[in-house]
Image: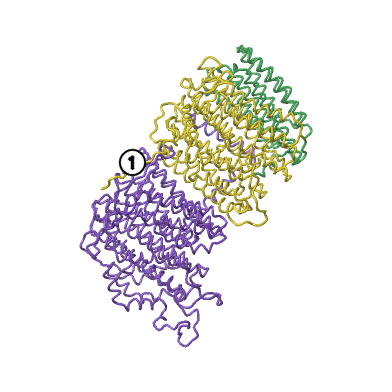
Amino acid sequence: MVGFQLVNGLAGLLIVTSLLVILARRPGLSAKFYSLQSLVLVAIFIALAGVQASHELYLWSASAFVTKVVLVPIIMYRAFSKLDDPKLGSGEVLPPAMSIVLAALVVVLCYWVVSGVALPAAAAIKPALAVSLAHFFLGLGCIVSQRNILKQVFGYCLMENGSHLTLALLAAKAPELVEVGIATDAIFAVVIMAILGTRIFLTLHTLDARSLTTLKG
Amino acid sequence: MVSSNLPLLLLCGPLAVAALIGLCPRNLPAACFEFAHLASITFVLVLSLVIVGQVMNGSDLTAFGDWFVIDSLGAVFLLVIGVVGFLTGLYSISYLRHDVAHGALDAGKLKIYYGFFSLFLFTMLLAASSNNIVMMWVAVEATTLGSAFLVGVYGQRSSLEAAWKYVIICTVGVAFGLYGTVLAYSNGSDVLGNSEGAILWTTLVAHARALDPMLAKLSFVFVVIGFGTKAGLFPMHAWLPDAHSEAPSPVSGLLSGVLLKCALLVIVRYYAITVRAVGPDFPQMLVLILGTLSIVVAAPLFFIQQDLKRKLAYSSIEHIGLIAVGLGVGGPLGVGAALLHTLNHSLAKALLFCGAGNVMMKFGTRDLGLVKGLMRLAPVSGVFLLAGVLALAGFPPFNVFVSEFLVFAAGLKAGYFWLMLICALFFTITVGGLIQIIAKSVLGKTTGTVPAGDVGWGALLPMSILLVLILTMGVAVPAPVARLLQNAPAGVLDGPADVAVGAPWQTAPAADPVAVATGNSSHTETNP
Amino acid sequence: MTMMSFSFLPDPMDLLLVSLLLSAFGALASLLAKGNDGVATWVAGLPGALAGLAGLAAGLPALTSPASVFETAGPYPFAHFILRLDPLSALLVAVISLLALVSWIYSLAYVREYRGRGVPAMGFFMNLFVASMILVVVADNAFWFLVFFEMMSLTSYFVVIFDQDEEAVRAGFLYFLVAHAGSVLIMAAFFIMANYAGSYDFADFRTATLPAPLASLVFLLGFLGFGAKAGMIPLHIWLPRAHPAAPSHASALMSGVMIKIGVFGIVKVAIDLLGASPNALWWGLLVLAFGAVSSVLGVVYALAEHDIKKLLAYHSVENIGIILLGVGVGMIGMATGNPALAVLGLMAGFYHLINHAVFKGLLFLGAGSVIFRMHTKDMEKMGGLGRTMPWTALSFLIGAMAISAIPPLNGFVSEWYTYQSLFLAALGGTPFVKFATPIAAMMLALTGALAVMCFVKAYGVIFAGPSRHPDPSHGAPEEAPRPMLIGMGILAAACIVLGIAAPVVAPVVGTIASRTLGAAPVAFADGALLIPAGEGQAVLSTPLIAVLLIGMAVLPVVIKAMLSGGNTLARRKGEAPWAAGYLPDVHMSATAGSFAQPIRMFFGPLYDVRRSLASVWTGLEVRFERFVTFARRTEPLWDRHIVDPVTEGVDKAGRRLQPIQGGDFRVYCLYIVAALVVLLALTVR
């Protein structure tokens, strides 16, 4: 059962890295932290693959390494480090300490929810499952609580990592082509968001989400 | 089940065109892009009609080792994609020419538009034909990505804002759908003991009775929330008015007429699983709640909206709500009525968005306060818009009347009297809003600042085809379509199809309605 | 029973189809004549008039013959296309066709007013309007009924908004919404019945037995839905706006026949379709109550009107009320197991239905002729038209006398039957019926008195006195063109015939009533005498009254003298009336406002007739004026409490809901989470 403990421990590390992504001041730094986080994710995949003897998961971790650790951070780093909106400041709605407390709360809540659900396949990895769910909601929290639209791209990426982990935990033996599809979607999503974000910055000269509220009613 | 290469061929066509256009240099003459675009939409139309024809004859098609399945249910949506995709695509050509000529669109954007149009078609076809549930999710997510640039193609402040909201809200929403998908998969793989089968929808449906009920319920909740976002159900609808109003009109028609329906198809697929796993009550309650809420909230918002395309967007939410109510009512009649309404609404909404496009071309604005007397300035466009509005309002002899009639009939048959009355009254509010469009914008006195004259035939041709289709579906559902609609609910529902009140698709395959209609009789009754 | 023989005519159903085809042809031909208004007038009008003739030829023989059915498979298996011509629908077909015939003849000249404003479209919509009305009454399948009902609303909507000015558009909007809301309720009623009947055919509805509460629900839905179409108070709000907005020949059709389809629908649902289900006494009482309120308030509101067409529209509300009184008594008779009462009440309602169609059509056409010449609807700006438009004046006078229920014209006969039915109901039945029917009779008496007052005013102000046209250089108007006079003449003759020939007509109407109820026929006439349902309590002979009136040759002259403002007896043409030595002044002549006071003096004898008929009139005179003033104050209340709250409510609801779409997509994301949480809570509860 060492393998499962490893998985659960690494999952905990994932939360820490995602907080780093959220709280980082500059988009470039966030991109680096994101790369770090994805590395942890890949490690989890490998650990899981070992535990569950899943041939597919090795392939997953390989493709995740290429896309999430390398490709996506590079795209974001190159796209976002040019964009800066000094008026926006940090763009945080909540103070960092509050964010950390809330993140802890989300983890606890998710743990409680997951423990209430009977999942025969995932009895041993419930903490990891809780973390994956929490990770997803942390990403959502990032989207909701940050005014900088680039942070919302990171929020999406965090959500994506969370759901990816869930997928790996619950559907470890799914065909690899499925994983390729999801990864492709993720990359395209990031590319499209990056392009749109850049166009918005060039047109509106701001990265403030609150300036994107003219369409209403 | 017949293995066939047609589904793959259908998917490859638009994808190849999209890639081809993507590789072309940006400054190619517009005609090149238009030609490629035309080839792509014609290809999709013809092939989807061929496939639908085969399915109508009773043979479901599979491809790529069951990863793609086109059954009667999928064929209904394939039909929508093929027909509405082709017609809005055809309309696009003259609409974009107008935009380029009037400087609203940079000629270089044509490449983006036509390329993504085909890509968008590809993603929707993927969603409608996929049998692999994760692939289904991937496809729906991909529709967002494929259409984001179409929504933001004008590059103005508002269109970029709409595109950004569209991407963020839909990716967030659809991400929930992935949880539903994963839950369904892990539930299925536990039951089946093998992981290969559990990823196929057909296998899950076949073994749905053995699924863990609680997980099946949770899975359905996530699916409804996730894909409901894409389908435009309240309260996940928020992206819809922005995206619909800011996109070029043909794209709005495509979003409203086809995209929402594709997301709906996924919900229907999971509905089929859940009905078998936990009985009909739970899934019906869920879609009934969301459907009713969509109608109740969208109707007043529709009524006071002054932006024509935003108005139409709210109407889409309302009609998606009605489709959901039809599903929520359940039974062969409810599901069949919902599917018929899917078809009918797609046609009517496509016509209306094209009509809104004509209004844009004539008046350069969507503000209903400024659009006056379209009928006098451009009589043909006026008649089309009038017909579209009346169709959407649910007046005979237009098609929406029939499907609304059937949804309400199904609801009352299932005992939802008050609910149906509430829905019907809220639809009356919508009718009020639609009549105001007629009274103020289609009719009414012209202001004199807009020159008279209709838009080109290139824009009117697809609209006239749409109108003919709407009238055909309103007067009598053609026998092949009726057969399709007769078979489709069987794939969704569990249990025998006992129907007390007949419905259009319940004709026996031999009894062609047209053939029956020719014999008439006149006789005298004796009365005291 | 059949005193009329139509054996020389083809089968009624064939004629009906011919009529429909002619209307369809007229509609298309009118559209094709786009660009030439003169041609369009004729190609719409002639087939329309022929369709009216064919419809009459189909409807009249079918009044007393067995029901005939035309059946063909519809486009959907549940929507059999069935047309059924039974006595009830034949009655409506005949009335619609008569009015259509007259309106089309009238339109040949009248439409000139609309040259260059879309005459072809008018011909198109009017023809379809007539056809859809006929189809509604003969449709024998719920699906098709709703289809044609909506078509009728839609086509008439386009006629109402024909002027496309702000007022017409608003009137049309209100009209359409009320009509559509009504059809939603009707649809609900039909759906409930269909669930029990197992099909959408009315034939199956008739035999289906619903449990009592559901039958009551169906009745209520149908009553409110059709009541909205009929224009009964408080669902009348659209009527005084929509009818005046339409061209006059269309108003004649809308007011004359379309609102009757509302009454038809109530009868159809309550008596015809729910015939096999248990019916409750309170249904009839409800109809009676709505009828009484509509009749009194309708006429009170009419009194205050200066707009001639609005005045007529309010009188439609009143007369719908009177018809509903008869129908209500019929339903009470049905519920209390008194077939004679049922037949009498229903017969009174049907008779008044026919009569109102005829005289209201006539009055609207008359108003149209005046407007055609004067180009205003404000009665205060008319006056003295009787001198230059004598035929119009005469027709209008006949219509006004008929609607005022002055014997021997038709309005009197049907009101007399209505009284008799109310009295008969008061004689027997439960205590509550005994209590309610005299009140209804009292209300009817009040209505009658006020109607007289109102039409004395209307006729006097329009046709008598000096011209009050604001522009003195405006020459005296010419008589209306011949087609318009012919149209009015036909209806005026019908008013007289339906009154004097009542001993012939009443049994036919009675047969229709008894056949609709499935009851045994009841005698309504004995030679030249009218008798109410065979009971020997009262007799009336309109031919006798006519003879008496003609014999008293002085009386008409006196009436004419009074009506034309007192300057006829020694008429000096072309000169101003003598005004006590002063120069005649416009302000001296009676206007709409100043007519209320001397009314009772002029019409004392008529009041006396009513008093003896109603026998409940004493002691109310003192409170009379106060009541009128009070009741009139309620008029804006309907707007304030029904129309405004609904439109404002929707508007407000929309504005309240708009913050949902506040623009911030981060909030939108939270909606998704909230929805998820709620649904999850629903799942695990």
In the displayed structure, A95 sits above or below A44; it is: below
The answer, for residue B320, to whether it is visible in the render is yes
In the displayed structure, C297 sits above or below B367; it is: below
> Residue C285: which quarter of the image?
bottom left
Q: Position of residue C644 (x, y in %)?
A: 50, 56
In the displayed structure, C506 sits above or below B7; it is: below
| Label 1 residue SS | helix
Return the residue at label 1: C204
Q: Which chain is purple?
A: C
Looking at the rendered structure, the kind of residue marked 1 is Asp
> Residue C215: which quarter of the image?
top left
Q: Position of residue C207 (x, y in %)?
A: 30, 42
Colour in which chain A is drawn: green
Task: Pick the residue in front: C666 or A12.
Answer: C666
| Farthest-out residue, front | C8
Q: Which chain is yellow?
A: B
